Image: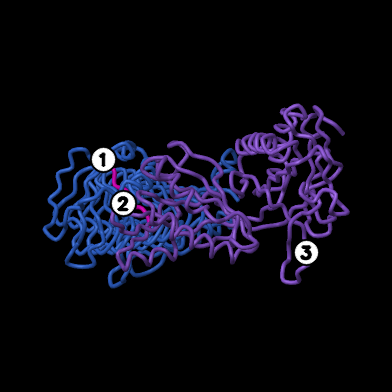
Chain colours: A blue, B purple
Amino acid sequence: MSGWRLRLLQAQPVRIDLRGITPAALAGLSAAQVEQLRVGFGNTTMALAEFFKVEPLSPDDSADDSLVFEGDLSRCDRIGWQLAAGRIVVEGSAGHYAGGCMSGGELLVKGHAGLLAACEMSGGALTVEGDVSDFAASTLPGSMDGMRGGCFIVKGNVGERFGDRMRRGTALVFGNAGDFLASRMVAGTIGVGGQAGAHVGYGMRRGSVVFAATQATLDIPVTFVPALVEAVVFWQLLARDLARHGGPFATLPSRTIERHLGDLATDGRGELILAR
Amino acid sequence: MIHNGVAIDDSFAEAFPMKGTRIVITAHNITWARHAAVSATGFATSVIACGCEAGIERELGTHETPDGRPGVSVLIFSMSGKELAKQVERRVGQCVLTCPTTAVFAGIAEGEAIALGKNLRFFGDGWQISKLINGVRYWRIPVMDGEFVAQETTAVVKCVGGGNLLLLCRDTDAALAVAEAAVGAMKALPNVIMPFPGGVVRSGSKVGSKYAALSASTNDAFCPSLHGLVANSEITPQTRCVMEIVIDGLTEADVAAAMRVGMQAGIAIGASGGLLRISAGNYGGKLGPFHFHLRKLLAAGSTS
């Protein structure tokens, strides 16, 4: 199986819905068949070739079965939606719901991503090298659980409500996070390399939010209590795992921590961890 | 076959399949890790009445443990996976959970999973927290010195139990010296434990008894006090003290390696040090699938 390169022909005035365009769906198809795959366009569907130039990856890349999107896809939504296996690379920005509901495989976005990236993600790896907008790693509207597995890495900044209702998995932000970080978090791990906005851990039940910035200035909500004891064993297990992602997390295992437990308004078994 | 004055019997040790696991106990310092490991491997000399055979495999440096603290690796063997699971839960629950500053981790990754912290977590009375880190689930249980961290499960693998050496010696002093040297050499190897006190057992047994209720009884053929009394005595007037070393290991090769270095350590002491003969316990080869022939082990050792 060889990969594909889909080159966006021009920016569209209406959003394109790329759900279903996954390496597994394209496997075994001819270029002509791939061109005729239907994608959402506003309230109708169109052939993929209306928007993308479809090319098999060159024979030199025969070992590479990635699906590569080229161009500014910031108006293309649901890239890697329900991705279960294979690799997708976006050489540019992605629209909303990037990596939404993905359960395996790998999605790499070299630019930015829109709203609800990694929402209800349950496995695999999603990396965004730029920024992502609000409600990343969170839940689809009306659903009970947000991100529930896998590894989500944002090299830039994230918007508000990052990790809302998150239940499991690891979500790391190398830059800053907006307001209501980890709101209503059920469990899992969030790491932030920069600063966070107001109302961190609002309604958080369980889970760990790690602040890796040495000078993290955090307005700890009054519904959190400082922890009296260190959790050295747990911290070493977690810090060593986060350290392999590098960046602001690389030095975590050698640093001491300060923990705040809450949110007492709900279950109260979550923790905000400030690395010193 | 005679090495350094020591007669090596043309015999073999007969060993059995067991189920085993390795757990890693860490603590604030090696002293407390040791306390927990000694306690958890206590009363675990023989499956006959202890439920399992367990021992300390070795001590671990800070760079070898999951949490970067000093630790001890422990091997636990039992006759069935079910019994092993019971023993691990009891021993970890009573001896590791209770021991100051400890944490416990699986020491084997591949194999059928049995509970390690999975059921102990209920000690947390609802305050326990599960944490999935890099695909491995841990339980954090609040305790009076902070937090007891236990990996959810450990893996069970098929093992080999009951490898043994019989060291026929001139007297008690010589027998202890030879046995201690052999155990010392074996302890340097990975994946094996010698479950008896100090690694040595003086009450070697044979299968069966004159009493119907007993399945095993004293190995009268090797009892110096019965020399001249039992018909099949293996004792000569020169051998007045016999010690046995029992070895459990993760694989047949591990047990073989341990028996080999044990024999070599004894041979190094030699007849001048009081070791006259090395033999091994078997049941005619009909009971256990693993046969460790003493002469073959030594020959393989000298060529390698």
Is residue A145 in view?
Answer: yes
Q: Main secondary structure of the magenta part?
A: strand
Residue A256: image tag: 1
The disc labelled 2 sits on which kind of residue? Ala
Please determine whether, in this image, residue B175 is positioned above or below residue A118: above
Q: Residue A12 placed where, x, y %?
A: 32, 55
- Judged from the image, the secondary structure of the residue bearing numbered disc 2 is loop
User: Disc 2: which chain?
Assistant: A
Q: Are marks 3 and 1 on the same chain?
A: no
Residue B208: image tag: 3
Q: Quadrant of residue A208?
A: bottom left
Structural crowding at the residue carrying mark 2, measured as other residues with C-alpha within 10 Å and reported as few (<14), some (14–19) or many (≥20): many
Label 2 to label 3: alpha-carbon separation:
75 Å
Frontmost residue, A208 versus B252 = B252
Label 3 to label 1: alpha-carbon separation:
61 Å
Q: Dot 2 corresponds to which residue?
A: A113
- Judged from the image, the secondary structure of the residue bearing numbered disc 1 is loop
Quarter holding the C terminus of chain A? top left
Frontmost residue, A135 versus B198 = B198
The disc labelled 3 sits on which kind of residue? Gly
User: Disc 1: which chain?
Assistant: A
Q: Residue B10 placed where, x, y %?
A: 87, 42
User: Disc 3: which chain?
Assistant: B
Horizontally, residue A203 falls left or right of residue B52, namely left
Q: Nearer the viewer, mark 1 or mark 2?
A: 1
Looking at the image, how many numbered discs can be counted on the residues? 3
Structural crowding at the residue carrying mark 3, measured as other residues with C-alpha within 10 Å and reported as few (<14), some (14–19) or many (≥20): some
Q: Which circle's residue, 1 or 2, is located before the other in the chain?
A: 2
**Discs 2, 3 touching: Cβ within 8 Å:** no
Frontmost residue, A172 versus B109 = B109
Q: Which residues are magenta?
A: A169-175
